[in-house]
Amino acid sequence: MNNVDWKLLKEIADLEKTPMGAYNIRKNGRLDGRSNTAHIVIDTKTDKSGIDIHIAPGTKNESVHIPVIITETGLNDLVYNDFYVGADCDVDIIAGCGIHNSGCETSQHDGVHTFHVGKNAKVRYVEKHYGEGEGTGERIMNPQTIVYLEEGASIHMETTQIRGIDSTKRYTKIVVGAGGEGVITEKLLTHGRQTAESEMDIVLAGEDASGRVISRSVAQDESRQVFYPRMIGEARCFGHVQCDSILMGNAKIKSIPAIAAESPDAQLIHEAAIGRIAGDQILKLMTLGLTEEEAEEKILDGFLQ
Amino acid sequence: MNNVDWKLLKEIADLEKTPMGAYNIRKNGRLDGRSNTAHIVIDTKTDKSGIDIHIAPGTKNESVHIPVIITETGLNDLVYNDFYVGADCDVDIIAGCGIHNSGCETSQHDGVHTFHVGKNAKVRYVEKHYGEGEGTGERIMNPQTIVYLEEGASIHMETTQIRGIDSTKRYTKIVVGAGGEGVITEKLLTHGRQTAESEMDIVLAGEDASGRVISRSVAQDESRQVFYPRMIGEARCFGHVQCDSILMGNAKIKSIPAIAAESPDAQLIHEAAIGRIAGDQILKLMTLGLTEEEAEEKILDGFLQ
């Protein structure tokens, strides 16, 4: 682990030293460090690249860190991580990927994460994507997250891509069982000529399932974003999708949501707004002594924090 | 014109006698009556079925009625109507189609309406679709409406399908020029095994164009509805799409909108909600002495009026 590695780990997982609890650090497509606990066991997959994470039923107040860092240019890393979270757990899972590309070839990480969350278990899943490096090589990340929630289980997923990813295609699917809850908070900022596409399927499959998507995005410069959040109500359920996007420069944003009531007892709401920062918001901050740029930055910080 | 004809005309165009001003009444695929005015001239198309309606520039406070009624079972009527509305007009256009099907064969009307609305002209366009008849034959209507608004021009389109249409596929497109305004208010009620699909493209093409879609629908029994309202901002513009749907019985509703900011100065908002009538709304009306059915009816009336 060198300085570049630690900088990436700090950005994506807020780590300044080896984490407490269970962890698995992957660097340039290879295992760099692993720790298990009494309740959390991480195994290397034997049939393909990736790991299985088994969390024993009833495990509470424990965390798993599984950051991935890439510092080689031209590396294409595809990994499958499967999480088996036992009943009645209450755990934090911190994933994330950082790419430092100082070369001229594309560095790419595609992570396919599948969660099987047992009865009444609670998972908080945090995932950050970050890219940097003075090279001309592209930094690409295509995360796929599939979640199955059993009765009464919940996941709160916080996903953030703030800077440096040239191209991303994100796919998230959550199937919510009876009385379960799936919440996704997505924050996305693109700049330069970056492109981002985010597709989601939230299936409210069981009675009294609930789902919520809060998506906040900023598109700067010449960047492009497309969103496809879909919420399907198959039972008595409540679902809410809320997407807010800020346009800057010559950016373009499209939002193509879908809400589908397959059950007459489904209640579904969708809201989306796309637009520039209101001029009077900027003016107000400028009268307090900020420059126009500082005012804009202040507003974006508040919007994405 | 017999009693059945007049009942249909009353339902779709609120007519109890031959209308004032310009009109063209089509019955069972044939012209049944026409009147021009000094400013409004209706011509039969020579290349295909339908009419051309020319409204002279500056025509104000005049109306055109162009109702279509079908009382023959097994009739399939396809018509193309083109409207040329001159600059600075302020006119009402009342279309609509009523089908009385007492036979066992399908009766169908497909109307393709195209509007060319000149500079600063204002059009109010009202369109009602209604079906009845004791026959087992289906009643089908597939209206298509294409509108081109020049600079400063506006259209307020009110479209209603309240009962009796077994299957409908609606398509509406409005291209809004600089400073123009396109407003669509759509009301739709389906029951039994009816299906309804409504697709819209609102293109905000010119600077300071604005667009608004207000869609209210009720799906009862085993009926199915799908909505595809799309709003595209190609310039500095403001667009708002608002869809509210009430589910009853075993009905299903899907809403798949799209908002696309192709210009960084576009401001677009979408809201959609699907759900049953809130139980406490019904309870409140029941404590005022209404039965449950009366309470439900009262709420639907308010929602769709």
Image (tube, coloured by chain):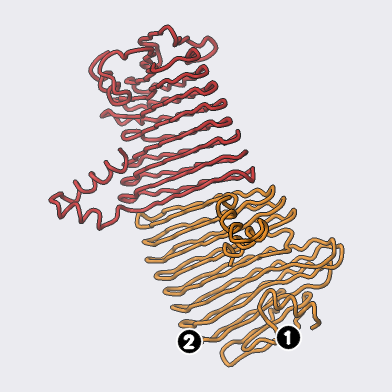
Chain colours: A orange, B red
User: Residue extending furthest left?
Assistant: B289
- The subunit carrying tag 2 is A
- The subunit carrying tag 1 is A
User: Residue extending furthest bottom?
Assistant: A38
Neighbourhood count class around disc 2 (C-alpha, 10 Å): few under 14, some 14–19, many 20 upward? some
Residue A252 rendering spot, x and y as whole percentages: 65, 48
- Above or below residue B74? Residue A26 is below
Q: Which residue is mark 2?
A: A58
The N terminus of chain A is located in which quarter?
bottom right
In the image, B143 versus A205, the foreground residue is B143
Residue type at tag 2: Gly
Q: Are marks 2 and 1 on the same chain?
A: yes
Residue type at tag 1: Gly
**Visible in this render: residue A169?**
no
**Residue A204 position by quadrant:** bottom left
Residue A281 rendering spot, x and y as whole percentages: 56, 55
Q: Residue at left 20%, top 55%?
A: B284
Q: Residue at left 72%, top 58%?
A: A167
- Above or below residue A264? Residue A14 is below
Side of B121 relative to A294 (left or right): left
Side of A274 relative to B40 (left or right): right
Residue A98 rendering spot, x and y as whole percentages: 73, 71
Residue A188 rendering spot, x and y as whole percentages: 63, 61
Give the CA separation, mark 2 to mark 1.
26 Å
Q: Which residue is mark 1?
A: A33
**Looking at the image, is mark 2 or mark 1 earlier in the sequence?**
1
The C terminus of chain A is located in which quarter?
bottom right
In the image, B173 versus B70, the foreground residue is B173
